[in-house]
Amino acid sequence: MPLRVKAIHDIWSGHQVLVHLDPTFVLPPENVLTYLPVPGDLFYYYRPRNYFRGAPYGRSESAEIGIVYDRDTRPQGPRGPEAVNLFATISSGLEGFARACEDMIYRGQKDLILERLE
Amino acid sequence: MTRVRITLGRVEAFAQLDEKNAPKTTKWLKGILPIERQAVHSMENGREVYVVLDAPYHIEEENQTIYQTVGDLIVYYKPAIFVKPEWPRHVRDFLVIGFVYERDSAIRGMSGPLATNLVGRITEGIDELAREAPRMRREGFEKMRISLASRDGNA
Amino acid sequence: MRKLLVELGGTRAVAEMHDDIVPKTCDAVWRVLPVEGMAIHANWSSREIMLHLHGEKILRLPPEGPVRRGTTAPGDIVYFWRSPQMSRGKQLAYSSEFQRELSELAIFYGDPAGGGLAADDPARSGRDSNLQVSTLFATLIDIPREFARKCEDVRHTGLQRLLVTRLGQ
């Protein structure tokens, strides 16, 4: 941190945006969430090369941060639901953040900044 | 907006009914309140407590989701096999009303996720329910009562 | 085949171990017997009661035997281990001795047995499937009606003392 990256809207999981990190940033499972996130959850996820089928980003090795902005969401890909490391939950400002995320469905990528708040 | 009071064992909580998105189910629910039945803990869905509504109501699918989460007040037909150990074979399911008190839960049918009518959200007292339900898993289940509550929280 | 005696609230059932299929798991379980504690009813896996292993009785065993795909039958007794990373939530229903690293014996007493989310969740069977171990190591020879009824009671009336001992040796 700080992270300044392009966020994209997820196409598999529901109301969720994600950013791709340096794929060599590989972490072991921790505080594993296998089922439903709640709106505001931030999670880390890693997959090796060719784990999923499908373009544009399924075949690449990838480390990601996902942010869930509304309910009826479950982290998943072409092989079905995925286990993720839950590491934070948004504590304020979710409503405006969710509007910005939803807007990405229609208008595409946005810049995402993730930084420490002392 | 209608508030309902949920009393489980030693604690109470309040839920706001979602009359806009589940108009038929909430109308029906308001008509049968108050109800008091034996509370049962789910054995297949995680952190869910429910009561069986044994009258032959017919509830239509409305405001449905398979993604139930903490504080959801839900109405649905639960497969009978999850309710009674030796269930009457001519009964395939029981109408239930219940709530989810902790995350990582999911309502299931016999072969996968089960969509439920989301009729309201618990707005006060979910933490108390989330302590009372595990206590009852250890010490035994008591009754659950659901009744109409006025806006100021008094019955 | 070695046999186990399972006692719950004054009722009894006898199980036969699957020495021929999962000998290492059977040996490991046999060594820690007798085990005793308060059994709690499952909230994921349907008609199942669980006995959490504590202290020196905790077993950390690798997977053994054929891969099971969510088909658990009434009477099955399963050794289950779950890594601490998987145990999210408050777990308030469990005893104060409960550890995030879960080691337990799970007794399936009726129909449906298993089939819960934990058993067949695709998220748990992905790359990180080493986060849990589930080994079927014994099966009840029969399920006495009063034993099954007592198991069901645990669901409604709370914890019951469960004792698993060696039978005949």
Image: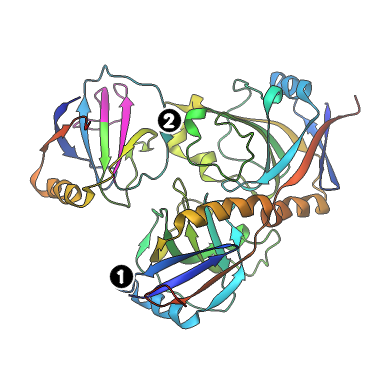
At 81% across and 40% down in the image, what residue appears? C141
Read off the residue under disc 1.
B21
Most common SS among magenta residues: loop
At 17% across and 26% down in the image, what residue appears? A2
Q: Is residue A47 magenta?
A: yes
Position in image of residue C111 (x %, y %): 67, 51
Per the image, label 1 sits on a secondary structure element best described as loop
* In the foreground, C74 or C95: C95
Residue A77 image-quadrant placement:
top left
Give the amino acid at mark 2: Gly
Read off the residue under disc 2.
C126
Position in image of residue C104 (x %, y %): 65, 33
Q: Are marks 2 and 1 in contact (CB under 8 Å)?
A: no
User: For mark 2, does the 10 Å Cα neighbourhood hold few (<14), some (14 to 19), or many (20 or more) residues?
Assistant: some
In the picture, measured across the screen, residue B25 lies left or right of residue B142, that is left
Give the amino acid at mark 1: Asn
* In the foreground, C72 or B145: B145
Task: Decide if residue B119 is in sight here.
Answer: yes
* In the foreground, B111 or B23: B23
* In the foreground, C153 or B85: C153
In the rendered image, which quarter contains the C terminus of chain A? top left
Residues drawn in magenta: A40-64
User: For mark 1, does the 10 Å Cα neighbourhood hold few (<14), some (14 to 19), or many (20 or more) residues?
Assistant: some
Task: Decide if residue B109 is in sight here.
Answer: no
Identify whether B25 is placed above or below B101: below
Q: Nearer the viewer, mark 2 or mark 1?
A: 1
User: To which chain does the residue with label 1 belong?
Assistant: B
